[in-house]
Amino acid sequence: MRAKPSFTAGQLHRHTSPDELARTTRALRATGRKIAFVPTMGALHEGHRELMSRARRIPNTVLVVSIFVNPLQFGAGEDFERYPRPLEADLEVCAAERAELVFTPEREALYPDGAQVTVHPGPLGDELEGAVRPGHFAGVLTVVAKLFNIVRPDYALFGEKDFQQLTLIKKMVRDLDMDPHVIGIPTVRERDGLAKSSRNAYLDAGQRTAATALSAAVTAGAYAGAQGAQAVLAAAEAVLAGTPELEVDYLALRGPDLGPAPDQGEARLLVAARLGGTRLIDNAALHLGGGELGTHG
Ligand code: AMP
């Protein structure tokens, strides 16, 4: 018989082995506690902390955080190698947020030689981010499915910052009959509106100033919602055009589930742009038509 994993409630425990983590979460579940899970790639900032703090506030839950820079979701020539990996600082953040379990697997533990099966995201996986980053969402959904199978969370929290990712994870859970209750958390921003992101560390001072145009654009678009779709896009485009350093990959108005935008009602405005070698994304919720002011999510 295997020894029971040792676990002291209220303390941070770090696991690198998927089997060991699965055993610990199983044992915790058997004691009646629920599992709230926050998957991350590390370089933790206030956005991640908000997810953790929301997770912790769900009654009777253990907060489990994973830190894994998932090679499968990076394309050739993307920033996998240079992605920041400040593990010690990240563990301190997890402890400060009162996580009780941190999962930091090695690449080989999640993708042993010969691993070939992946999750296919369906048509939405080839649009917007997926059109610019082919294979990205297959990589994301595959690692999230694997993490769900290891952790078996009751709740899984994801940021609206990566709105297409959140939408696809909800679809995966529904379409593949998975258990976790997926919770989307509004984007945490810098004081000037820039969405917090681990990639903001790549920006030099000039780029950092220019980067505020993304949030300014989706905010301007959201506030034009009452005048309809064309006004939304025109307002956002005007802001982007004022920042020529930005190379815009897309500006798109969609429905709340990223289907086609409705004539009236809830919608999402999404933008992606490059600043030098750094790719940034943002989005906002809005209400189309009806003469009301839009909202900024
Ligand atoms: P990442 O480490 O970039 O993979 O992000 C891990 C989780 O944190 C994802 O669910 C992201 O959507 C979420 N996240 C990243 N940045 C923010 C932010 N500024 N506000 C809220 N959630 C965020």
Image (cartoon, rainbow, N blue to C red):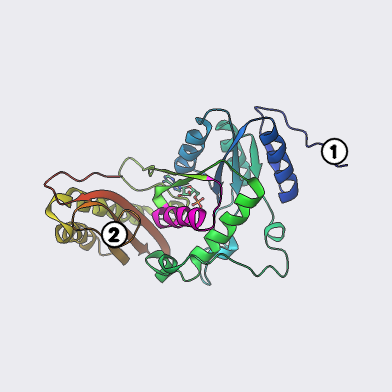
Kind of residue sitting beneath label 2: Arg
**Lower position in the chain sequence, tag 2 or tag 1:** 1
Which residue in the rendered view is the most extreme toward the right? 1
**Which range is magenta?**
162-180
Is 13 situated left or right of 119 in this image? right
Query: Would you name the residue on which mark 1 appears?
Result: 3
Please tell me how many numbered marks the rendered image carries: 2
Which residue appears at 32% of the width and 53% of the height?
256
Q: Is residue 164 magenta?
A: yes
Q: Which residue occupies the foreground of this view, 237 or 139?
A: 139
In the figure, residue 38 lies in which quadrant?
A: top right
In the figure, residue 94 lies in which quadrant?
A: top right
Give the structural element (helix, strand or loop) at label 1. loop
Establish if 279 lies above or below 35.
below
Question: x, y (%) of residue 62?
Answer: 60, 33
In the figure, residue 21 lies in which quadrant?
A: top right
Query: Would you name the residue on which mark 2 appears?
Result: 254
Is 187 situated left or right of 215 in this image? right
Question: x, y (%) of residue 133?
Answer: 45, 69
Which residue appears at 70% of the width and 40% of the height?
26
Q: Which residue occupies the foreground of this view, 209 or 197?
A: 197
User: How many neighbours does mark 1 have within 10 angstroms: few (below 14), some (14-19), or many (20 or more)?
Assistant: few
Quarter holding the C terminus is: top left
Question: Ligand 1: does it lie within 8 Å of the C-beta at label 2?
Answer: no
